[in-house]
Image: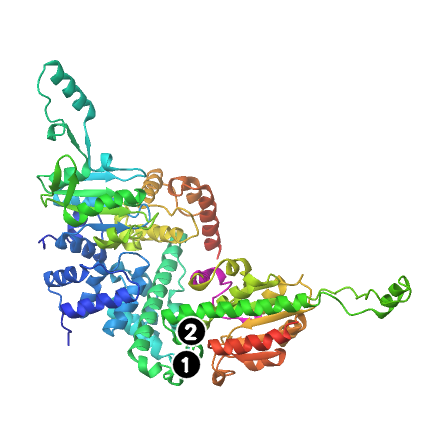
């Protein structure tokens, strides 16, 4: 089914997300074809941020499912409210009533996927860090993503109201199944390019001019290419620069050494970064 | 003239073509593709290829493959360069204002307007300016990319990035601009060469191999995936065969020569009868072998065959060490011993790990590095097998280094995958190394490798 929804770079900028044409085209392809969008990329590159920006822009309700190892139907899809069921059974027995159906809507707890399927208003289902979940969880997602429905043994098949879009994010810690990937539009979201990162920084730090922002973004781009375990995320860069800006520290000389802990969170990485910057500066 | 939107038939054929080349495209991708292209009213084939990537790619590592497949299928120069990276070269322009007259026009146009079309033009000029380009040579495209990137044309452009900034952060800015420019230009040149090679595929095909059906006569470089798999296994078996022969010869001398003096002395204890014959103790003369494999760009697929051959030897015979080299050598004995087949290409996939300097072949540095690594290994009965095309990027090679090389080994055997007609042409140093080798053979197919193995196994003692 083809939908007539699309966003532009300017639209996303209005909600403080600075996207490239490539990102917008991938996003629009998913919206138009009404297919899930799978966003893969390094941690901290703005994947979840994109989903939040989209939901804010389109005024869609954001339904978030944070994946983790061992997540199952109970956390992702639905759960029966056992306590309520037991209490209901007890009270029905006490009042000598006929035991009502304890597997009815009254006792059903909707988890994110079911909430999205049954949502009456337009919503965005964000399945965050799907690579952390097990393969069994992926299998559960297949029915939802492909057929917009899910089966609950006690209630039967529940078909979606076509009122939601889906975005999945992955940090590529493991390879997702082909079956899942084939059902999605694929977007690889790397760390932003220098000019895009400069725009993000300027959006968060008042008074930062274009030239300064590009210089900082260039430094960060250089750092991310070094042989370090954990490149700094966009959020960490913003925090670091906010601190430096607030304290009016210089980034020249040993300015970085004083506050590197905000930017680089690994001890070995910090040594590597400081050494390499010193080498670069002494050339 | 703009091309028409690909029809359903063309989209299906392209999807099948991708699947045949191990790009996993879903069954519904074609239908979705048609819907997407219709929705956006895309009538331009380049735009269509751009949008199809969102449906056909499901992995970061598939992006490069998609580029190549789209280029091959649609017979176009495809490079899904993200031009919306929006690099601003204003800084470079403002520092070089006085030099505009001397600046290359394509480069200046690109700096002023960094569009994909301008990048293509610049790439085109760089390729055309490189007179030695010969796509019929059996080398990888990366080999030519590196040659072009090291050319005077690129040097002339790159010098405009040599700007000193007033502050350290400014230096990072200029450095990053230069790196990004070089990277984009390199990618574009690769796409262009790939397109040129595929466009004229028939022209560049090895004519002397066209009619051959015998796989053992087929050039390693002109094999398809299935043939390659078979040949890799055969190369490994030949390695094992050689190793078995080496072991046999090493073990054959279980007994030394008969010692007449000792035998007579012994017979005294038997009243003069020669009950016991005494042999001299066997002097262990197990042959020691060093294998030295060139994995630079010019070697292309031959390195993989060389390493597979080597893995066969290594797994069957312990007294061997393996080294790979580009501009310095690295020991890979354990890696090659543990891997085989296509997995060995994982060694070459991490190509950067083996680059010591600039990534261009340097036989002198590589030989020196090897000699340093094996300095503690005794030269007695030490043999060397080199797998390389002897292309040295127009670098001279010191005769003293070659002499030291010759002195270290009892025998040196050289397998050269390049056709003999190209030896000693261009930057080939075959004429320098031939005098120090006991044997230098052209080995480009399985049969030649077999003949070499038969020859060497008689001599390796």
The chain letter for the residue carrying disc 2 is: B
Helix, strand or loop status at disc 2: helix
Q: Is residue A163 left or right of residue B390?
A: left
- Cα distance, mark 1 to mark 2? 9 Å
Q: Nearer the viewer, residue B272 or B353?
A: B272
Q: Position of residue B388 (x, y in %)?
A: 52, 73
Give the residue pinned by disc 1: B132
Q: Which quarter of the rendered picture does the N terminus of chain B lie within?
A: bottom left
Helix, strand or loop status at disc 1: loop
Tag 1: Cα neighbours inside 10 Å, few (<14), some, or many (≥20)? few
Which quadrant of the view contains residue B14? bottom left
Q: Is residue B346 magenta?
A: yes
Give above or below for B145 relative to B424. above
Residue at 58% across / 67% down in the picture? B243
Q: Which quarter of the rendered picture does the C terminus of chain B lie within?
A: bottom right
Which quadrant of the view contains residue B42? bottom left
Q: Is residue A185 magenta?
A: no
Q: Is residue B285 left or right of residue A11?
A: right
Give the residue pinned by disc 2: B147
Q: Are marks 1 and 2 on the same chain?
A: yes
Is residue B429 visible from the viewing direction of this image?
Answer: no
Residue at 50% across / 71% down in the picture? B361
Q: Position of residue B322 (x, y in %)?
A: 56, 64
Res. B123 mark: none
The answer to the question of whether label 1 and label 2 lie on touching residues, with beta carbons closer than 8 A, is: yes
Q: Is residue B81 left or right of residue B433?
A: left
The chain letter for the residue carrying disc 1 is: B
Extreme top residue here?
Answer: A94
Q: Nearer the viewer, residue B209 or B283?
A: B283
Compare marks 1 and 2 and give the one earlier in the sequence. Answer: 1
* Residues in magenta, as a range: B344-365
């Amino acid at each position: 089914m083809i939908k007539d929804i699309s966003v532009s770079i300017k639209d996303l900028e209005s909600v403080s997300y600075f996207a490239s044409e490539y990102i917008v085209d991938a996003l629009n392809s998913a919206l138009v074809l009404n297919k899930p969008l799978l966003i893969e990329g390094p941690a901290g590159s703005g994947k979840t941020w994109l989903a939040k920006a989209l939901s804010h822009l389109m005024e869609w309700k954001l339904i978030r499912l944070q994946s983790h190892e061992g997540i199952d139907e109970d956390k992702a899809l639905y759960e029966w409210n056992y306590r309520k069921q037991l209490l209901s059974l007890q009270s029905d027995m006490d009042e000598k009533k006929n035991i009502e159906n304890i597997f009815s809507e009254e006792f059903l707890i909707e988890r994110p996927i079911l909430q999205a399927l049954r949502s009456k208003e337009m919503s965005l289902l964000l399945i965050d860090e799907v690579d952390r979940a097990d393969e069994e969880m992926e299998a559960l997602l297949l029915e939802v993503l492909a057929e917009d429905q899910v089966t609950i043994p006690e209630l039967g098949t529940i078909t979606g109201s076509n009122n939601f879009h889906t975005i999945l994010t992955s940090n590529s810690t493991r390879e997702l199944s082909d079956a899942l990937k084939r059902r999605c539009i694929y977007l690889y979201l790397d760390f932003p390019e220098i000019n895009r990162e400069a725009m993000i920084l300027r959006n968060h730090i008042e008074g930062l001019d274009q030239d300064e922002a590009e210089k900082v973004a260039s430094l960060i781009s250089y750092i991310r290419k070094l042989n370090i375990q954990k490149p700094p995320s966009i959020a960490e860069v913003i925090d670091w620069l906010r601190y430096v800006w607030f304290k009016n520290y210089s980034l020249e000389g040993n300015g970085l050494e004083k506050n590197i802990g905000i930017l680089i969170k690994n001890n070995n990485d910090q040594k590597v970064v400081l050494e390499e910057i010193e080498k670069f500066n002494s050339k | 003239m703009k091309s028409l939107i690909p029809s359903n038939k063309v989209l299906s054929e392209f999807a099948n073509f991708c699947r045949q080349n191990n790009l996993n495209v879903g069954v519904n991708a074609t239908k979705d593709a048609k819907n997407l292209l219709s929705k956006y009213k895309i009538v331009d084939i380049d735009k269509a290829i751009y949008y199809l990537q969102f449906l056909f790619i499901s992995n970061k590592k598939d992006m490069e493959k998609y580029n190549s497949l789209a280029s091959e299928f649609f017979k176009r120069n495809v490079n899904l360069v993200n031009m919306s990276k929006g690099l601003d070269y204003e800084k470079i322009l403002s520092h070089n204002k006085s030099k505009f007259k001397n600046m290359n026009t394509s480069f200046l146009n690109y700096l002023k307007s960094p569009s994909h079309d301008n990048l293509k033009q610049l790439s085109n000029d760089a390729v055309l300016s490189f007179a030695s380009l010969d796509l019929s040579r059996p080398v990888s495209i990366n080999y030519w990319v590196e040659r072009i990137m090291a050319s005077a044309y690129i040097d002339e452009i790159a010098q405009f990035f040599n700007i000193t900034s007033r502050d350290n952060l400014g230096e990072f800015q200029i450095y990053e601009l230069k790196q990004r420019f070089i990277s984009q230009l390199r990618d574009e040149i690769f796409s262009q060469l790939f397109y040129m090679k595929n466009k004229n595929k028939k022209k560049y095909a090895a004519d002397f191999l066209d009619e051959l059906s015998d796989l053992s006569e087929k050039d390693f470089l002109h094999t398809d995936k299935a043939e390659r798999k078979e040949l890799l296994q055969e190369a490994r078996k030949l390695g094992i065969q050689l190793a078995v022969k080496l072991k046999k010869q090493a073990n054959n001398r279980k007994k030394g020569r008969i010692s007449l003096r000792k035998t007579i002395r012994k017979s005294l204890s038997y009243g003069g009868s020669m009950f016991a014959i005494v042999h001299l103790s066997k002097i262990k003369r197990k042959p020691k072998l060093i294998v030295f494999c060139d994995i630079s760009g010019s070697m292309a697929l031959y390195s993989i065959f060389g390493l597979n051959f080597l893995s066969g030897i290594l797994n069957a015979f312990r007294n061997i060490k393996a080294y790979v080299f580009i501009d310095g050598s690295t020991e890979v004995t354990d890696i090659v011993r543990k891997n085989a087949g296509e997995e060995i290409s994982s060694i070459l996939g991490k190509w950067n790990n083996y680059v010591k300097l600039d990534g261009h072949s340097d036989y002198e540095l590589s030989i020196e590095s090897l000699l340093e690594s094996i300095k503690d290994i005794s030269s007695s009965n030490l043999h060397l097998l080199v797998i390389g095309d002897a292309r040295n990027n127009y670098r001279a090679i010191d005769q003293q280094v070659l002499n030291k090389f010759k002195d270290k080994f009892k025998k040196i055997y050289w397998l050269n995958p390049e056709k003999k007609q190209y030896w000693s042409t261009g930057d080939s140093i075959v004429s320098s190394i031939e005098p120090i080798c006991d044997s230098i053979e052209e080995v480009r197919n399985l049969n030649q490798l077999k003949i070499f193995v038969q020859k060497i196994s008689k001599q390796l003692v």
